[in-house]
Structures are given as structure tokens and as C-alpha cells.
């Protein structure tokens, strides 16, 4: 969770996207509904990519620690 600013932007995009989607459904504005869905989905994808990046970094650190212990 190193990138707190990026994660907060993703959360903002998700909330705004869900709001646009709800507005579009309520008013019958299909383009606004689709725009909201896309924005929300984009935020979900960015969140998953950030999680994957964090997992890779943690895995790399674990391997690095194990290798440094072997050298001692």
C-alpha cells in the first residue's frame, strides 16, 4: 500500500463513476450510465494492478531476504 495518493484517486474515481451510473439509470441517460460504469471499472482495474505490484514487491523482498541470509 505504498501508493496512498494513487489509491485515494482510484477510490474517488470509483465513487464518482458509481454516482454517474446511478444518475444515468435514474434519468434514463444511457451514455452517462455507460460512462459511469467505465469509470468505475477503470478504478477497479487500477486497484487490482496496484495490488499486483505490491505483491510482486513483497515477493521480491522475501526472495532478497532469503538470499542474503544464505550468504551469511
Image (cartoon, helix red, strand yellow):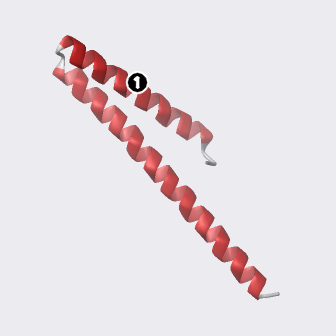
Q: Position of residue 18 (x, y in %)?
A: 35, 26
Q: Secondary structure at mark 1?
A: helix
Residue 10 rendering spot, x and y as whole percentages: 47, 36
Q: Quadrant of residue 46?
A: top left
Q: Percent x, y for residue 70? A: 75, 87
Above or below residue 43? Residue 26 is above
Q: Is residue 56 above or below residue 21?
A: below
Going 60% across and 63% down the picture, which residue do you hit? 57
Q: Is residue 58 above or below residue 10?
A: below
Which residue is at a point 39% across and 46% down the rendered structure image? 45
- Mark 1 crowd level (few <14, some 14–19, many ≥20, 10 Å Cα): some
Q: How many marks?
A: 1
As drawn, is 28 to the left or to the right of 60?
A: left
Asked whether 22 or 10 is in front, the reply is 22
Instruction: Please tell me in which quadrant of the rendered image residue 42 appears.
Output: top left
| Residue 26, picture quadrant | top left
25 above or below 7?
A: above
The residue singled out by tag 1 in the image is: 16
Residue 63 x, y percent position in the rendering: 64, 76
Tell me: 69 left or right of 56: right
Q: Residue at x 28, y 16 (%)?
A: 23
Outermost residue, top side: 27
Amino acid at each position: 500500500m505504498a501508493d496512498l495518493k494513487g489509491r485515494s484517486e482510484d477510490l474517488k474515481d470509483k465513487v464518482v463513476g458509481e454516482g454517474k451510473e446511478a444518475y444515468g439509470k435514474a434519468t434514463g441517460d444511457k451514455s452517462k450510465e455507460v460512462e459511469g460504469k467505465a469509470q468505475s471499472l477503470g478504478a477497479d482495474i487500477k486497484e487490482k494492478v496496484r495490488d499486483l505490484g505490491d505483491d510482486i514487491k513483497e515477493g521480491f523482498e522475501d526472495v532478497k531476504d532469503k538470499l542474503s541470509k544464505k550468504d551469511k
